[in-house]
Amino acid sequence: MSHPSPGTVLVLGLTGAIGLGIASTLASRGWSIRALTRRPPGNCPVLPFPVEWRHGDALDSNAVAAAAEGVALIIHGVNPPSYQRWREDGLPMLANTIAAAEKASATILFPANVYVFSEASPQLVDERTPRQPTTRKGKVRLEMEQMLEEAATRRGVRVIALRAGDFFGPGVTNSWFAQALAKGGRSAKVVRTLSPAGIGHAWAYLPDLAETFARLVDRRAELPAFTLLPFGGHADRTGRMMAEAVQRGLGQPARTVRPFPWVILWLGAPFVAFFREALEMTWLWKTTLLLDNTALRRLIGEEPHTPLDEAVKAALAPTA
């Protein structure tokens, strides 16, 4: 016997890893999925769940508002392309999402990150830690969080946000894990360490993060209008745990492990925009920054947590 759908979700960024990850988990719970895309009709990917595709751009406020009609949730999983134009494109896209959510009385699901902190932040941050970014992208991300908080406080828009570390997982190709630590996945010839020994780093296995969003959605009626909680994820406390897990996942513990050649970014920065943008965030690999999920666990119990070796094996698997 089929059960009625709990509602419709609008996904901005369904073709990206975070949007797809959260949408997949909600679809498995019976939610109907709608997505806004710039791709022409007939050129949308075939996914393992039904999708109602709407043509439009997240920078077009009218297109976002029209796509959001009748939805209960909006996943804001869209980012400026090529790691650039955060202020020029990132802020307007979020403003469009907020306006559409207000009109539709929908809850926004927002993946927050750790850019809002700095080298002066404590090694373990929680929801009360002051946000004092020193980088351009960090300041924009802080503005985005403040926009969401203001929308919840003054406009009645409900927001569920999770602050997580670096993503990794099946299909997450645009990440430090896939592009640097284990470039080539199962075919990787070299495993790279990104941090000096003893420097801790926060990682977020995407299926666990998506499941956590879904559990908060299940309890959204009990949450404050603005909910922003740290997601603990996998804490690499030694700077070597992730590389060692990759070695085990490849089945060849003797596989060469070398430090990531950061000099490549410095040399290429004058010519490659992504390198220039990435250099701004290298402090995250020089300073221990981990996430305290105590408040999250008080709400949902134990955080969804796939064992590290299992998660790494899934992340190394080739994409379909």
Image (spheres, rainbow, N blue to C red):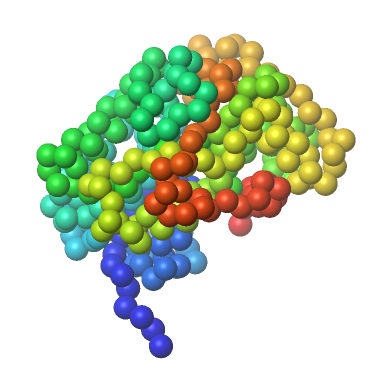
| Residue at the extreme right of the image, as rendered | 254
Residue 183: x and y, percent?
68, 36
Name the image quarter holding residue 30. Answer: bottom left
Count of residue discs? 0
Residue 275: x and y, percent?
52, 20
Which residue is found at the position 46% from the left and 48% from the top? Answer: 297
Which residue is found at the position 69% from the left and 43% from the top? Answer: 185
- Residue nearer the viewer, 212 or 90: 212
Residue 238: x and y, percent?
68, 28
Residue 310 in the figure: left or right of residue 134: right
Q: Is residue 287 visible?
A: yes
| Residue at the extreme bottom of the image, as rendered | 1
Which residue is found at the position 19% from the left and 42% from the top? Answer: 152
- Residue nearer the viewer, 165 or 177: 165
In this rendering, the answer to whether 120 lies above or below 231 is above
Residue 30 in the figure: left or right of residue 260: left
Residue 224 in the figure: left or right of residue 310: left
Which residue is found at the position 54% from the left and 42% from the top? Answer: 233
- Residue nearer the viewer, 130 or 75: 130
- Residue nearer the viewer, 170 or 275: 170
Residue 235: x and y, percent?
59, 36
Q: Quadrant of the N terminus?
A: bottom left
Q: Is residue 16 visible?
A: no
Residue 198 in the figure: left or right of residue 204: right
